[in-house]
């Protein structure tokens, strides 16, 4: 069904009746009654047909009313329902004269075409870049073509280097054992409920800042202080998202006059920039004074500061700022929200928790136990946690940290499922919906079953075009391996010491944002496991 067809239904009977001169012979009141009857008929017909296909296209406003209704309930479920009814792909028609028209797909064949086979034909695009430019500049997240390729190559070399792995593993041990576990120990001792999502967000923010800038902002310090840089970063991200749901001319006018969300954005970015440029300045000084040989840093800022561009000149402060800000955005909340959904699922599946504990117990027993409760998991032990790996992947399948993603079409194209794509079309790929499609995962697609990832007890990965939580093709998430390591280390360190109980009647629903936060956080209480002495108690 499309808006064109419905408009014709509304227009044509009235128009032809008028042409036949029928209205000239009817009293005005009857004309109004006839028009009302036609309107009611068309509305009921649209709603009936729409309910069947989960798609109603209204004249002028297109599918906007259904979308707004969907947003009020759960937009991701609404999209999933529509995709189910439409065989995996549909064209979203927004109101006339807006830029809200796009193709939405959850078909793995289309995903492979989009992310790998025809990769150059589906960049992030100018619309995305111009919307996020103030916060992200030319960083890896928003860039395309050569600017993206250059950053990807350097960052990729760094992410796979031994120094980087050891730096990230070390900083994680420090954060978990001297910050996270003491915070949890206090909450347990006081029997006080805490928002686990907030605590995890603080942990990954500190962690990714150490990776990007080589500095620790201290969000997870005792008392959980509000850190201006972290707060400004969060505000800047939220204010940027508002641009996506505001007509371009309006947000540009707000920016010009420095009003509303644009004023908020400008002020937040100023705080982010102040922090970033100060770190860059001190790092340049440190490097030029030769101090780096003593500190041997391997954070991304240090790596890029030492590099030269193709003309042999050092990168500008602005470019270094963009590199770091983009990395922070990429790694700041993706693993923490995934962990929050994982702990919530565990709460409903004690049998899964039991199996994870069995796996951890086996590792601790091989070490000869954990007498003092201070056990720190070693990288090779984390690697051996295959069931935990499966349980986290299963949580990401059902609650992917990035629920929808998008691309723009450069040249006319056709998807493998036959959908025609015109140049300039926006394509949304519905990662959340893909995890809930019977056609992809079978009849039990909505069940939480880590076993579906295991073969003979070993974790088996899935095609990136079927399990798209980490994207796929040349823009596959650069932090995927690190994210798994981080999530497994944190989950095992908590589960080894505590049973995490979600508070009764605590509402758990996704927030409509670029990342799949829990709207009201995750309120939990902790119960120390028998036989483990708890750090900081
Ligand atoms: C559970 C955790 C994570 C998930 C589910 C995840 C998912 C994703 C997704 C879907 C993208 C593609 C985004 C897009 O192009 O629009 C992406 C890109 C990226 N991710 Fe992750 N991510 C996670 C953790 C991390 C971490 C911890 C880091 C870094 C420390 C990281 C670094 C990156 C980078 C640099 C990119 C950009 C890659 C490119 O465009 O070439 N990610 N990630």
Image (cartoon, grey):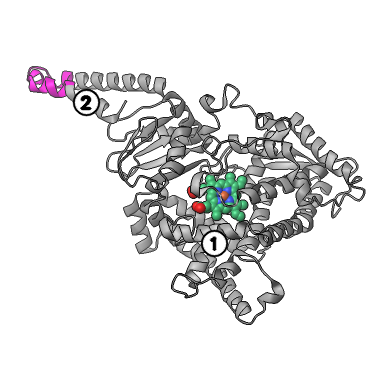
According to the picture, the residue beneath numbered tag 1 turns out to be 154
Residue 437, percent across and down? Answer: 52, 27
* Quarter of the figure with the N terminus: top left
Dominant SS type (magenta): helix
User: Which picture quadrant has residue 30?
Assistant: top left
Question: Is residue 403 among the parts visible in the rendering?
Answer: yes
Q: Between 344 and 261, which is closer to the camera in this rendering?
A: 344
Residue at 49% x, 57% y: name it: 140
N-term mark: 1 or 2:
2
Does residue 22 belong to the magenta stretch?
yes
Residue at disc 1, secondary structure:
helix
**In the image, residue 331 above or below residue 303:** above
Between 346 and 240, the one nearer to me in the picture: 346
Residue 514: where, in percent of width, then height? 51, 46
Using the numbered discs, state the Cα–Cα distance from disc 1 to disc 2 in whole angstroms: 55 Å
**Ligand 1 within 8 angstroms of badge 1 C-beta:** no
Span shown in magenta: 13-31
Q: Is residue 106 visible?
A: no
Q: Nearer the viewer, residue 316 or 476?
A: 476
Q: Are marks 1 and 2 in contact (CB under 8 Å)?
A: no
Label 2 sits on a secondary structure element that is helix
Q: Which residue lies at the image location 50% right of the left edge and 74% below the top edge? A: 314
Say left or right for 47 vs 268: left
- Mark 1 or 2, which is nearer the eye? 1
Looking at the image, the residue that sits furthest to the bottom is: 289
User: Which residue lies under the disc numbered 2?
Assistant: 8
Q: Is residue 424 magenta?
A: no
Counting from the top left corner in percent of width and height, residue 445 is at: 58, 26
Circle 2 Cα neighbour tier, 10 Å, few/some/many (<14 / 14–19 / ≥20): few
Q: Residue at x 63, y 82 (%)?
A: 289
Quarter location, residue 359: top right
């Amino acid at each position: 069904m499309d808006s064109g067809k419905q408009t014709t239904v509304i227009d044509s009977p009235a128009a032809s009746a008028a042409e036949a001169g029928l209205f000239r012979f009817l009293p005005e009141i009857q004309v109004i009654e006839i028009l009302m009857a036609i309107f009611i008929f068309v509305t009921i017909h649209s709603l009936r047909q729409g309910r069947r296909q989960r798609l109603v296209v209204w004249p002028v406003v297109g599918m906007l009313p259904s979308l707004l209704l969907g947003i009020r309930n759960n937009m991701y479920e609404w999209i999933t329902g529509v995709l189910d009814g439409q065989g995996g792909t549909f064209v979203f028609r927004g109101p006339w004269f807006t830029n809200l028209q796009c193709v939405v797909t959850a078909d793995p064949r289309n995903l492979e075409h989009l992310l790998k086979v025809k990769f150059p034909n589906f960049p992030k695009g100018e619309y995305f870049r111009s919307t996020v430019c103030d916060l992200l500049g030319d960083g890896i997240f928003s860039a395309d073509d050569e600017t993206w390729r250059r950053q990807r190559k350097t960052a990729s070399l760094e992410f796979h280097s031994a120094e980087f792995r050891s730096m990230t593993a070390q900083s994680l041990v420090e954060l978990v054992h001297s910050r996270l576990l003491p915070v949890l120990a206090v909450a347990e001792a006081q029997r006080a409920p805490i928002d686990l999502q907030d605590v995890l967000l603080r942990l990954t923010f500190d962690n990714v800042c150490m990776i990007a800038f080589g500095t620790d902002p201290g969000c997870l310090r005792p008392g959980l202080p509000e850190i201006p840089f972290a707060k400004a970063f969060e505000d800047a991200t939220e204010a940027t998202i508002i641009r996506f749901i505001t007509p371009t001319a309006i947000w540009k006018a707000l920016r010009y006059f420095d009003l509303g969300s644009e004023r908020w954005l400008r002020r937040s970015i100023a705080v982010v920039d102040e922090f970033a440029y100060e770190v860059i300045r001190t790092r340049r000084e440190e490097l030029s004074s030769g101090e780096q040989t003593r500190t041997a840093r391997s954070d991304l800022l240090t790596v890029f500061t030492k590099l030269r561009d193709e003309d042999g000149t050092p990168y500008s402060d602005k470019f270094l700022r963009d590199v770091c800000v983009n990395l922070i955005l990429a790694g700041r909340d993706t693993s923490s929200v995934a962990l929050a959904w994982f702990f919530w699922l565990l709460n409903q599946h004690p049998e899964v928790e039991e199996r994870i504990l069995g796996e951890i117990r086996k590792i601790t027993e091989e070490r000869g136990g954990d007498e003092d409760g201070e056990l720190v998991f070693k990288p090779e032990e984390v690697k051996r946690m295959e069931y935990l790996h499966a349980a986290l992947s299963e949580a990401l399948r059902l609650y992917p940290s990035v629920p929808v993603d998008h691309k723009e079409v450069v040249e006319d194209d056709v998807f493998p499922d036959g959908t025609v794509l015109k140049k300039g079309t926006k394509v949304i790929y519905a990662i959340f919906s893909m995890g809930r499609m019977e056609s992809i995962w079978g009849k039990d697609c909505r069940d939480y079953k880590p076993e579906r990832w295991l073969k003979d007890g070993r974790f088996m990965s899935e095609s990136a075009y079927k399990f798209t939580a980490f994207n796929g093709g040349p823009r596959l998430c650069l932090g995927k391996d690190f994210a798994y390591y981080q999530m497994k280390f944190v989950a095992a360190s908590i589960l080894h010491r505590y049973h995490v109980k979600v508070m009764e009647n605590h509402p758990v629903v996704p927030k409509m944002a670029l990342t799949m936060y829990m709207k009201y956080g995750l309120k939990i209480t902790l119960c120390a496991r028998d036989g483990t002495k708890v750090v900081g108690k």
